[in-house]
Amino acid sequence: MNTYLIAGHAKFPQGMAARNVYDSLTITLELDLKYGVIVDASCTLATEHGREYIRQLLRGYSLRDGIDGLIDRVQMYYRGKAGQAIQAALRDVYGQFQLVTDK
């Protein structure tokens, strides 16, 4: 296999529909081993449309370029209540990525 899977977690804000199903937001990324490019992504938002939108927003970005560009994408294009949780989960994912790549 030429990819690996990492996950990040964050608390949902009060009033989110997904909070009735999940305790926290989880983002999983399938990353290319060599370049750190996001091949695929998933998250635990409540709607299929929201999950697919985040998937499309994240795919193709290389974590080797740092997390700031990806956070900027979320801030610019995602306007839902879970924006802060998505950003926090991505920071968590990036921390996991750094642990893997520092070895």
Image (spheres, grey):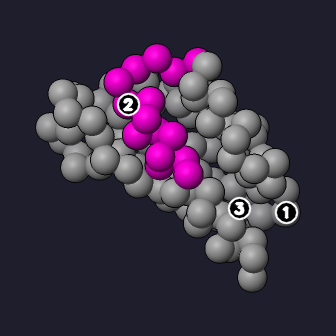
Secondary structure of the residue carrying tag 1 is: loop
Does residue 98 lie above or below 44 as drawn? below
Q: Hey, what amino acid is under mark 2?
A: Ala
Look at the magenta stretch and give its main secondary structure: helix
Secondary structure of the residue carrying tag 3 is: strand
Region rendered in magenta: 77-91
Secondary structure of the residue carrying tag 2 is: loop
In the image as oriented, which residue stretches furthest toward the right? 34
Q: Is residue 9 left or right of residue 52?
A: left
Name the residue carrying label 2: 82
Earlier along the polypeptide chain: callout 1 or callout 2?
1
- Which quadrant: the N terminus? bottom right
Mark nearest the camera among 3 and 1 is 1
Question: Looking at the picture, how far across and down is residue 3, in whole percent?
Answer: 71, 61
- Which quadrant: the C terminus? bottom right
User: In which quarter of the view is residue 20 placed?
Assistant: top left
Q: Hey, what amino acid is under mark 1?
A: Lys
